[in-house]
Amino acid sequence: MDALVAFTCIAPGHRDAEAGPDKLTVHDGKWAYCGYDARADGHEWKPNDGIKLSLLQHAAAIRTRSLGKGPSETR
């Protein structure tokens, strides 16, 4: 079963970065996803209707490739 994520981080500095290994956290008692690092400061959580975690991960991988970052450059 794929987890449903209720919040995504829309902070400008967190959007297209793939820095930290931790992408999930809990916000207001529900799963929240930050493509940069869930442990970082400065999140701007935006509620959504529940997005599958696998879809968020896939979208992040596409953004990373479109920015010309290879696997070694994403961490």
Image (spheres, grey):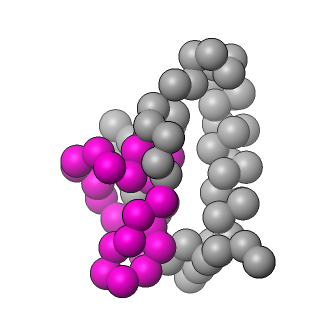
Residue 61 in the image: above or below residue 42: above
Instruction: Give x and y (percent) for residue 11.
Output: 33, 49
Instruction: Give x and y (percent) for residue 68.
Output: 66, 18
Residue at x 38% of width, y 52% of height? 38
Relative side of 8 to 57, left or right: left
Residue at x 64% of width, y 57% of height? 56
State whether residue 15 appears in this view.
no
Query: Which residue, as the protein is rendered here, is positioned at the far right?
Result: 1
Viewer-side residue, 53 vs 67: 53
Instruction: Give x and y (percent) for residue 45.
Output: 34, 65
Relative side of 43 to 63, left or right: left
Q: Which residues are magenta?
A: 24-48
Residue 70 in the image: above or below residue 61: above
Instruction: Give x and y (percent) for residue 9.
Output: 40, 57
Viewer-side residue, 16 vs 26: 26
Residue 52 in the image: above or below residue 73: below
Q: Quadrant of residue 73?
A: top right
